[in-house]
Amino acid sequence: MADQLSMAKFFRELHLREEPFLLPNPWDAGSAKLLANLGFEALATTSLGASTMLGTTIANLDAVIENCQEICAVTDLPVNADLENGFADDPEEAAKALVLACEAGAVGGSIEDATGDSFAPIYDFGLAVERIQAAVEVARGLPVEFVLTARAEGLLYDYGGIGDIIKRLQAFEAAGADCLYAPGLKTVDDMRRVVDAIGKPLNVVMGFADPDITLDQLSEIGVRRVSIGAALSRVALSAMMDAAREMKAGRFHFIRDMIGVGKLKCAFGE
């Protein structure tokens, strides 16, 4: 297995390339191996994908870290950890999630400004910035060049609009975040507007965007990292439920779409 120091260095270098790199999100060790076999350069966990394996859509820190550790253990690729809001409101407490992710083998992680409270879904601006400042301080003290991604979640909750998103990302950049992320950007024009307003690499998650947007278009406007969130997990679950409905109806045509055991063995290195 590649050592964590070299993976961290490589992951940071990926963010500095002229062309964007793809960061798919496996939900378990098996899907991580399959994605690595396809030639991706890095992986990112998905808290939703990890949670649905446990029969819920609500993540908890222990499950997220355990999932991250399992994914890191089966691949030589750098792994970025989806840490939601750090599972704490207090800046110092939330930042501790970065330590746990690094100990699990990750070389990057994200902290978001969503509270988890449906009545007040986004942290006030000042507290949101304090949380990233605390995360930066912790990240800089880790034993590897940990890439900290700061996420502004307002577009997912109809909070503040793109102007507020840009204000927050600029503040997160000033606080020292290495990568910036605003899930909910849907159009090339909005993505370009954000890229032009910041100086750090932007992660675009295509799970919320216009699916007709191409990687070439993202590259042209200066996007540096492209993830997919829980989309791969949700596509897999959708296919499973469709097949199960067909089975319940007494039909079995879905077996034609199964991946071959030989292909699995090859992807798993067996």
Image (cartoon, grey):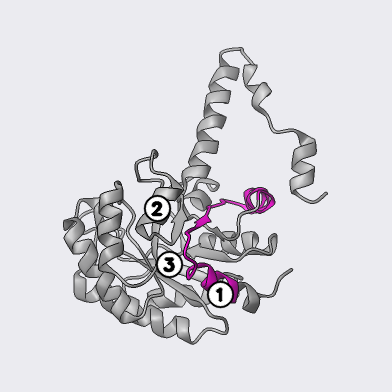
Front: mark 2 or 3: 2
Residue 103 lies in what quarter of the image? bottom right
Image position of 188 with respect to 129: above or below: above
Q: Position of residue 151 (x, y in %)?
A: 34, 64
Q: Is residue 119 left or right of residue 55?
A: left
Label placed on residue 102:
1
What residue occupies the far right of the structure in this picture?
270
Q: In the image as oriented, which residue stretches furthest toward the top?
A: 250
Front residue of 251/163: it is 163
Q: What amino acid is labelled 2 in the image? A: Leu
Q: Which mark is residue 110?
A: 3
Say which residue label 2 marks.
218
Mark 1 burial class by Cα count in 10 Å: few <14, some 14-19, many 20+ = many
- Residue that appears at 35% across and 57% down: 221
Q: What residue type is labelled 1?
A: Cys
Quadrant in the rendering for residue 114: bottom left
Asked if 7 appears above or below 52 in the picture, the reply is below
- Rounded to the nearest angstrom, the CA distance separating label 1 from label 2 is 29 Å
Q: State which quarter of the image contains the N terminus.
A: bottom right
Q: Is residue 148 left or right of residue 63?
A: left
Magenta residues span 9-38
- The answer to whether residue 72 is magenta is no
For residue 118, which numbered disc appears in the image? none
- Identity, as a three-letter code, of the amino acid under mark 3: Ser
